Amino acid sequence: MMYTMNYWGMDLIWWFLWILMLVWIFAIPYDIPGQRNKKDGPLAILLKRYAAGEIGAEEYNERKKIIEMELIRRS
């Protein structure tokens, strides 16, 4: 007896496995090595430096104003 459900040369199970593999690669929300990660913006970096005590309040406020003015000018 001849099997007629071959779905463009592949059995249905192989299509299911390919789709499952593509979903696994592109849709998993975990941090995968080599995956594009969102980088911190300049304000977030400045806040981290201020919180770590690397810079003082006066320097933080000055740099924050400069960064905010630059972001406003670009948009």
Image (tube, rainbow, N blue to C red):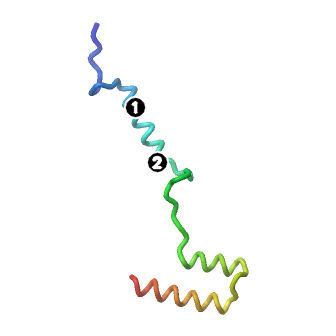
User: For the point 44% across and 37% down, which residue is it?
Assistant: 20
User: How far from the left and from the top, in percent, is residue 15?
Assistant: 37, 31
The location of residue 62, given as percent across then percent down, is 59, 92
**Residue sitting at x 40%, y 26%:** 13
Residue drawn at point x = 56 percent, y = 79 percent: 43
Disc nearer the start of the sequence (1/2): 1
Picture quarter with the N terminus: top left
The answer to whether the residues at label 1 and label 2 have Cβ atoms under 8 Å apart is: no
Kind of residue at badge 2 = Ala
Q: Nearer the viewer, residue 38 or 13?
A: 38
Q: Is residue 75 above or below residue 35?
A: below
Give the quarter of the figure containing the C terminus: bottom left
Q: Compared with residue 2, is residue 19 higher up or lower down, i.e. above or below?
A: below
User: Which residue is the site of mark 2?
Assistant: 27
Mark 1: few/some/many CA within 10 Å (<14, 14-19, 20+): few
- Which residue ends up furthest to the front in the rendered image? 34
**Vertical comparison of 30 with 41: above or below:** above
Q: Please tell me whether mark 1 sits on a helix, a strand or a loop.
A: helix
Q: Quadrant of residue 12?
A: top left
Left/right placement of residue 33 relative to residue 55 reads: left
Q: Which residue is mark 1?
A: 16
| Cα distance between the residues tagged 1 and 2 | 16 Å
Task: For mark 2, give the secondary structure.
Answer: helix
